[in-house]
Amino acid sequence: MEAIVQKLKKIMRFKATTSVGDVVLVVAEEPNAMIYALVTGFERDSTKRDEWWQVSLQILSVPPQMVTWALRTPQFTGQEIFTMGGEKRFVAAVDFDSEALVPPPTKEKEGKPSLRLVK
């Protein structure tokens, strides 16, 4: 799982925080899966001594599924890999900032026109 997360961090941009309305990538060890989910809510879990949250997610699958997981902040912000039912999980908000998605500029070939990004 650690190797998968390291590779993902090289090819995707993740946010440092997670908020309602964010799309998160959920990586599961067993069953081996990567899925997207929409964060629909956070509620403090007062039944636990430490700081835990009830994180509500809308799994973006067919059909869509609602789940609520009890997680600590480092677990739903991609700061740590954690286990659920003995299986490893990773959750982090994807950074869909348009600047992050623009590929790096390439050198123009002499005599050939090129496209450029205009804001």
Image (cartoon, helix red, strand yellow):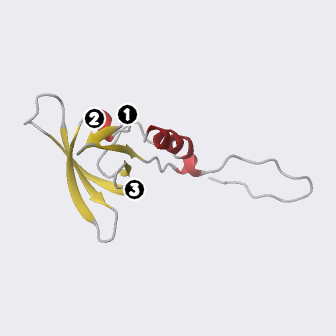
Give the vertical position of 66 relative to 27 (above or below).
Answer: below
Q: Which residue bears the numbered disc 2? A: 73
- Relative to 105, 32 lies left or right: left
User: Hey, what amino acid is under mark 3?
Assistant: Ala
In the displayed image of the protein, which residue is found farthest to the right? 111
Along the viewing direction, whichever of 17 and 11 lies nearer the viewer = 11
**Which quadrant of the figure contains the N terminus?**
top left
Amino acid type of the residue that numbered disc 2 sits on in the rendered structure: Thr
Q: Position of residue 22 (x, y in %)?
A: 35, 50
Mark 1 is surrounded, within 10 Å at the Cα level, by few (under 14), some (14 to 19) or many (20 or more) other residues, namely some
Residue wearing tag 3: 33
Q: Secondary structure at mark 3?
A: strand
Residue type highlighted by circle 1: Gln
The location of residue 10, given as percent across then percent down, is 56, 41
Q: Quadrant of residue 48?
A: top left
Of labels 3 and 2, the one closer to you: 3
Q: Earlier in the sequence, mark 2 or mark 1?
A: 2
- Could one spot residue 13 in this view of the protein? no
Separation of marks 3 and 2 at Cα, in angstroms: 22 Å
Residue topped by disc 1: 79
Q: Indicate which disc, 1 or 3, sits on the residue closer to the N terminus.
A: 3
Frontmost residue, 35 versus 22: 35
**Residue 13: assigned label:** none
Q: Residues within 10 Å of mark 2 (few under 14, many from 20)?
A: some
Question: Callout 3: few (<14), some (14-19), or many (20+) C-alpha neighbours within 10 Å?
Answer: few
Kindly indicate the quadrant of the structure image that contains residue 59: bottom left
The local secondary structure at tag 2 comes to helix
Identify the residue shown where x is 25% and y is 44%: 84
Distance from disc 2 to disc 1, alpha carbons, whole Å, reads 8 Å
Q: Are marks 2 and 1 in contact (CB under 8 Å)?
A: yes
Nearest to N terminus: mark 3 or mark 2: 3
